[in-house]
Amino acid sequence: QNPTQVGTALQVFHNLGTLKDTIANVVDGYCTVLEENIKNALDIKVLTQPSQTVTRGGPGRAAMPTPGNTAAFRAALWTNMEKLMDQICAACGQVQHLQKVLTKKRDPVSHVCFIEEIVKDGQSDILYKFWTAVTQTLSSQFQSATDSSMFLKQAFEGEYPKLLRLYNDLWKRLQQYSQNIQRNFNTSGTTDLFAELQQMEEDAQDIFMQKKEDYDPEKALKDSLQQYEAAYLSKSLSRLFDPINLVFPPGGRNPPSSDELDSIIKTIASELNVAAVDPDLSLAVAKNVAKTIQLYGVKSEQLLSTQGGASQVIGPLTEGQRRNVAVVNSLYKLHQSVLKVITNQSSFPAAAEQTVTTALKAVHDLMGSAVQPLLNSVGDSVEAIIITMHQEDFSGSLSSLGKPDVPCSLYMKELQGFIARVMSDYFRHFECFDFVFDNTEAMARRAIELFIRHASLIRPLGEGGKMRLAADFAQMELAVAPLCRRVSDLGKSYRQLRSFRPLLFQTSEHIASSPALGEVIPFSIILQFLFTRAPPELKSPFQRAEWSIARYSQWLDDHPSEKDRLALIRGALEAYVQSVRTREGKEFAPVYPIMVQLLQKAVSTLQ
């Protein structure tokens, strides 16, 4: 490692005219010594001997660890491997150093750079030649050693991350050494005049610092590990799958218990932790973990009950519904636990995290599809209850006291009772509160939308009816409260509910100029509501089409765009004009011009 002494030696051989052959011999010598080192490190006979004296095996005696001695054998193997890495590193360092001196040193007489002497025969990169020889030897020796010894094969496959870490450390040391050599040469103040100019060219000579176009030295080193990695990953996948196949026996009816799930999570965490030695291995194991999560999902899905009983909302929980709740809770626990495992991974590669997160999203989607039938049933029942408001009479005038006779309508009482019961009978059993609320809040928004829709269709609406309807608006907030974290979280739906109630008592002109129009409450809803203030001759859109209210409500669901809804309303207004002209009426209802004006305003805001 002394540039001056190596330089002097090179000069001697140069003077003797044997520089090229000498260097070839030296490098070949290193290769031979390393080949011996590799063979010795993997010599199963030496590894399995309890003492240092190697006794000759009798005829037909296979070299293998005696039972109970495997631990000692493995320990000896890993000690040898560490020693081997040191030997490779040292030899590499010497070849790197030799190459560096060759690129610097010139003959004082002819000023020819020594490296050019060797270049003549196309042998410039001795480090490249040496490294390809070493990596090929590693591959072939490892291959033949593990082919002939099951114990070696099992050690390298079973403890592959350990092996990979040794290789990674070796690679880091080689790169570090390259940088140190670079610094030493730069600071040693080489007497050579051309040194500075050559700086750039010679750095390109060092393959550990700079990859060649068609050759990746790190890949060449790790190619010898390929077969062990494949075997390790396959065993890792078995370790991940086994506990799952165990807790979902064929014909089983129940999801895994908490303890069983914990053991699955522990396995996932342990596989990821062991793989953390290398980003590529982490990614490969993360893909296995994703497959494991998928398997859990598939097995869970097979347990779900999809019969009619799964979506009933009349009686207490059925057997199928109980099982569905248990499956969703178990999927939720898996989802949360795996999330926790990946957030606790230090230096987890982004691609690996993405792989696991995608698999978790599928679990979340499965939870959603498991509760969907029940949500649909509840939604249908809520709609069925709200639509019964049209069976009640809102045409009455105010009683003498100026108060409505009942605090709220019958359908509202029924709705409150139903929602409270559904939450306590069914949804309370789910442990994933946020997930449940995300779904039930959507249901609350839908319930409010339907309530406002049908309230705006009530006709005729008397003063007493208005008071009772206003009370229903207040009670509606209480009705949907169990479905949400906070009613105010419902956003736009909540603002609509609040803004519509005062409109019940305002004049039509007032309503038309309300700031809530278009902003909070769609124009189509307000126009629908204004029909209730017109004479019976001005028919509501559904009356003109001779539809039932239920069919009209369905039509509105199928046509969410304001444009379609306003077109239907325009048709109803035009039909009214036609009917007035037919009977040669002298004037239109007072509310008609207000409605026409609103319609024009609505259409202009759409454009």
Image (cartoon, rainbow, N blue to C red):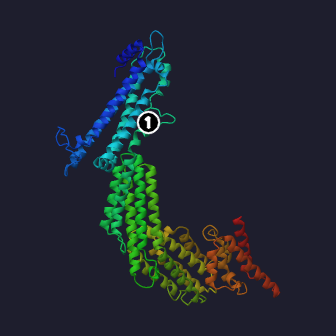
Q: Nearer the viewer, residue 516 or 541?
A: 541
Along the horizontal axis of the image, is 280 left or right of 43? right
Query: Badge 1 is on which residue?
Result: 217
Q: Nearer the viewer, residue 50 or 566?
A: 50
Say whether residue 356 is visible.
Answer: yes
Say whether residue 594 is visible.
Answer: no
Q: Determine whether 209 is above or below 489 in the image.
A: above
Q: Position of residue 46 (x, y in %)?
A: 23, 40
Please tell me how crowded label 1 is: few (under 14), some (14-19), or many (20+) other residues with Cα within 10 Å: many
Disc 1, SS: helix
Q: Position of residue 540 (x, y in %)?
A: 68, 82
Q: Determine whether 545 is above or below 14 in the image.
A: below
Q: Position of residue 387 (x, y in %)?
A: 57, 84
**Quadrant including the C terminus:** bottom right
Q: Position of residue 394 (x, y in %)?
A: 59, 87
Q: Determine whether 596 is above or below 364 in the image.
A: below
Residue, x 57% and y 75% (percent of image)? Answer: 449
Along the horizontal axis of the image, is 546 left or right of 268? right
Residue, x 35% and y 57% (percent of image)? Answer: 268
Q: Determine whether 300 is above or below 405 in the image.
A: above
**Quadrant including the N terminus:** top left
Along the horizontal axis of the image, is 280 left or right of 532? left
Residue type at mark 1 is: Pro
**Quadrant in which residue 98 is drawn:** top left
Residue, x 43% and y 17% (percent of image)? Answer: 105
